[in-house]
Amino acid sequence: MSRYRLQYAPPADQARAAMSTALRTRFDTGMQRIAADPYGNGSAPIGKDDDRREATVAGVVIRYYVSRQVLVVTVVRAVYI
């Protein structure tokens, strides 16, 4: 299986930057698992489009898009309390 490159849209990148160091470390580790298998790891499709996905990573709810052609996962939203 190919490894996907991770990228973050500005709102998700801002949320990631605001995380505590400990949370960001756990989150980044979990995101590496998403990059290895964006259709697994407890993720679920949003609606009928299998490439629009949602998952919880280290307690952070994320929404992301998978670009199969260019092997990129783009996180568009990250929400945590």
Image: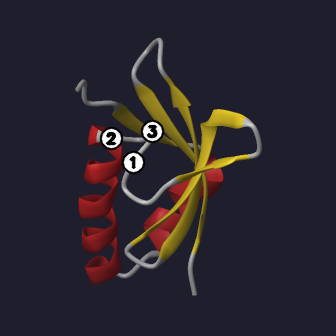
Split into 4 quadrants, where in the image is the C terminus?
bottom right
> How many C-alpha atoms fall within 10 Å of the one at disc 1: few (<14), some, or many (≥20)?
few
Q: Position of residue 24 (x, y in %)?
A: 33, 71
Disc with the residue nearer the chain's start (1 vs 3): 3
Point out which mark residue 40 bears. Answer: 1
Gap between marks 2 and 3 measured at Cα: 15 Å
| In the image, residue 35 above or below residue 69 | below
Farthest residue in the bottom direction? 81
Q: Position of residue 15 (x, y in %)?
A: 55, 66
Q: Depth check: give the residue in front, 67 or 47.
A: 47
Q: Is residue 75 left or right of residue 77?
A: left
Q: Residue at x 43, y 60 (%)?
A: 42
> How many C-alpha atoms fall within 10 Å of the one at disc 2: few (<14), some, or many (≥20)?
some
Which kind of residue does numbered mark 2 sit on?
Asp
| In the image, residue 68 above or below residue 47 | above
Label pair 1/3, CB-CB below 8 angstroms: no
Q: Residue at x 23, y 61 (%)?
A: 29
